[in-house]
Image: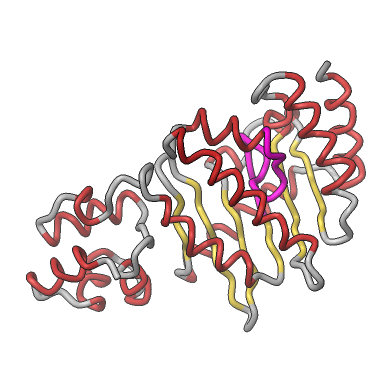
Amino acid sequence: MNEVLRTAMSRTGETCESLAGKIGVDPKTVSRWLSRGRVPHPRNRAAVATILSEDPAQLWPDRRRDATWFRPWREIEAEALALRSFQPLVIPGLLQTPEYARVVLTEAGLVRRSDVPNHVNGRMARRAILAREEPPSLTAVVDEFALRRPVGGAAVMRAQLNYLVNTAAALPNVRIHVVPTAAGAYAGLNGAFVLADLPGSRVMAYLDTPLAGEVVDDSDRVTDVLHAWESCRGEALPHRQSIELIRELAEAWN
């Protein structure tokens, strides 16, 4: 429980319903914010802090020191029947090699350097869902620029792209699509996201932000993400053509 938020709401007489009405979100969303580790979108954090006359940093401490903000999505990810991931800047987390993940986590600055090994191990552990007995399907759409960006240097990139081709794409439940640079401007330029199809026909989304991630379950916002997905997927190459492109780029990293 986020006791600081709960106490501030009690002090000001705000309920989940009243706070949700003032911000324009579902009361269930506010209820989830009361759980430790559930972090609202930056604009919602600012709105809540203003209404409660609190410092946002007091309500939600620095997530570089406490990465519990990702735990709710990790649980959703493990429950998902299908995952649809779009990444314009880096390889999706579920498809990263340890070396690539280490560079991304170190250089992004979201976690302390001393915590990077634990986060790399955690990211590698997440990959296990793709090879379990009843795995979710994963459709990953990646911008070609992410395959050309020299994260960690040529050796790291060559190993990463070879992993995509020889290991990840070899799984029957994994499909990888590349948006070629020739696509120009498209909806994916707005940022990375993941959609999770859950039991009971539920769909939830995860949005990347510069500081943390946001779990989205509001139906209108999820619909917006679904529209963005259709746009990104429509710009991407077919799976086999994408794999051939990734293989060519892997050979170019020498």
At horizontal 44% and vertical 39% (from top left) the residue drawn is 111
Between 231 and 3, the one nearer to me in the picture? 3
Q: Quadrant of the N terminus?
A: bottom left
Instruction: Please give the range of residues in magenta.
Output: 85-99
Answer whether residue 55 is magenta in the image.
no
Give the percent coordinates (x, y) of residue 228: 60, 52
Asked whether, in this view, residue 177 is left or right of residue 58, the answer is right
Residue 201 rendering spot, x and y as whole percentages? 64, 79
Quarter of the image holding residue 13? bottom left
Q: Is residue 133 left or right of residue 53?
A: right
The image's colour scheme reads: secondary structure
Q: Identify the image quadrant of the C terminus.
A: top right
Q: Is residue 108 left or right of residue 24?
A: right
Q: Residue furthest top?
A: 254
Between residue 194 and residue 6, name the one nearer to us: 6
Relative to 150, residue 160 above or below: below
Residue at the image position 82 percent from the left and 48 percent from the top:
168
Q: Position of residue 230 (x, y in %)?
A: 68, 55
Residue 87 occupies which quadrant of the picture? top right
Which residue sits at x=47%, y=61%? 215
Q: Position of residue 120 (x, y in %)?
A: 59, 43
Disc tally is 0
Q: Residue furthest bottom?
A: 200
Q: Inspect the magenta stretch and tell me whether residue 88 lies in it.
A: yes
Name the image quarter holding residue 130: bottom right
Q: Is residue 162 left or right of residue 18?
A: right
